[in-house]
Image: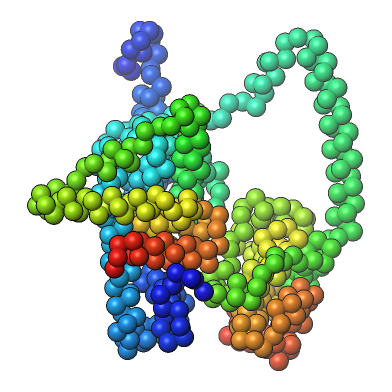
Amino acid sequence: MPPRDSINGLPFPTLAHVALSTKPSAIEREVMVLFEQFRDPLLRYALSFGIPVHDAEEVIQEVFLSLFRHLELRRSRQNLRGWIFRVTHNLALKQLYANQKLHAKTASDWTIAEEQLDPSPGPEEQLSSAQRRQRLLAIVHALPEADQGCLRLRAEGLRYREIAAVLGMSLGAVSISLTRSLARLIRADGR
Amino acid sequence: MLSEDLHVSGVHLSDQELLRAADGELPTRSAARTHAHLAACWSCRARMAEIEATIADFARAHRQTLDPQLPPIAGPRALLRVQLAELASNPPASSWRWLSQFTSPMRVAAFVCVAFFVAAVVGKLLLEHSTLRRAKSPVISSERGMEPDPNLTPGATRRVTLSDVCSMAHEEVVAEVSTSLRQEVLQEYGIVNAHPDDYEIDYLIAPGLGGVEEIHNLWPEPYTSATWNARVKDALEERLHELVCAGKLDLSTAQRDIATDWIAAYKKYFHTDRPLASHFVSNL
């Protein structure tokens, strides 16, 4: 017997029960596989925009629901990774603007996380390691948005072609941006 | 050339070359040259080590800063599974549901007026469009394949310098045409129900030669043409890119030749009347 609606006690099965009682389609399974593979990199990328974790999680859910609709409509399957990151980029940016409208300034989770130290080194090394990391991140934060985007997408393993597609830049611009950012980081680190 | 590159002289590799080599983003031939240089040059190897160490530092900082914030995946996974199942079991709402909002007679009258006006405008446009389509139906010959219609696809370029064009290998600057634009181009040429593998929506003037992704520079090029097909044109684009970057051909001449008659341009630049065997892959 199907479960009753827990709120109204009506003799109807809940929507979730109906939905889950059927076998997932091939597209649903494919989306779940991609979710397992890309959820963490996408969540990191969304968080790097400075939106709160719960907003970033919602963005990722929306990305994979959009992916389901995209695949269901038999749209292009070429460069799905680039497509997923592009949608995440757009939705995270939209969320950021919406949050900025609500609050003049949202406290960035990034800053909170910067206080968390890497547990592996000893206390003195830990301090210096954390200070170095903070300095490095401060330099990254001071970079133009497109340069930050290139660095973060590259850190998530995207190729130049994919980064170019996500950020709407040319391949040459991606290459120049990454080179410029790294040169700046090297110089600031006094290497 | 970048002002912040430390190694910009002709003797050493630039930071950009080093980074692209480290990232595996150099074309095969350049990568081999770069690795040979690195094997012989301590200075460039030391600079490469600095770049790699900075990449490692940034990648570590990126992960250590963000990873502690990531909640466990189990909850979001379960939520997504339910949402997907709901989406799959609920087809989109009926497109007639919106009619229910027209409850007032005034709204109904206004809607009918607007609908008449829209129908008249659309009908006129369709009539003009179909006349145009008949006048401009694509030219297809069994050997030359479908040629770009100069009225629909005259070619379009952006302002580029030689260094823009030559800073990347040809194959790296060819962008994929978006699905919506692809459909527009097929419709413009009166092609319906095309199989995705039958046509390449090709740039008349390739991006590597300054061509842009817009409808005036795109046309449906059949892979299945007997002789002069998309793969042969790809070879021409690569050849022109090489000649331009080697200083043996003006960029504007290359753009004009390929836009005017790409088959004639192929014959001219490969000194042949037929596609070379290495370029031509028969689909028949």
Location of residue B241 in the rendering, given as x and y in whole percent from the top left corner: 63, 79
| Residue A22 shows in this picture | no
Which is nearer the eye, A188 or A18? A188
Give residue A48's quadrant in the image.
top left
Query: Residue visible at 83% across and 21% down?
Result: B112
Mark count: 0
The N terminus of chain A sits in image quarter: top left
The C terminus of chain A sits in image quarter: bottom left
Give residue B132's quadrant in the image.
bottom right
Query: Residue lying farthest bottom?
Result: B271
Which is nearer the eye, B152 or B68? B68
Query: Residue lying farthest left?
Result: A122
Query: Residue visible at 87% across and 29% down?
Result: B117
Q: How is the image coloured?
A: rainbow
Location of residue A114 in the rendering, given as x and y in whole percent from the top left corner: 27, 43
Which is nearer the eye, B45 or A83? B45
Location of residue B23 in the rendering, given as x and y in whole percent from the top left corner: 38, 69
Query: Residue visible at 17% across and 50% down?
Result: A127
Depicted A117 relative to depicted B104: above or below = below
Depicted A76 relative to depicted B94: above or below = below
| Residue B82 shows in this picture | yes
Judge from the rendering whether residue A83 lies leftward or rightward of residue B126; answer left or right: left
Which is nearer the eye, B199 or B213? B213
Judge from the rendering whether residue A100 lies leftward or rightward of residue A8; answer left or right: right
Location of residue A190 in the rendering, given as x and y in whole percent from the top left corner: 30, 65
Query: Residue visible at 36% across and 28% down?
Result: A21
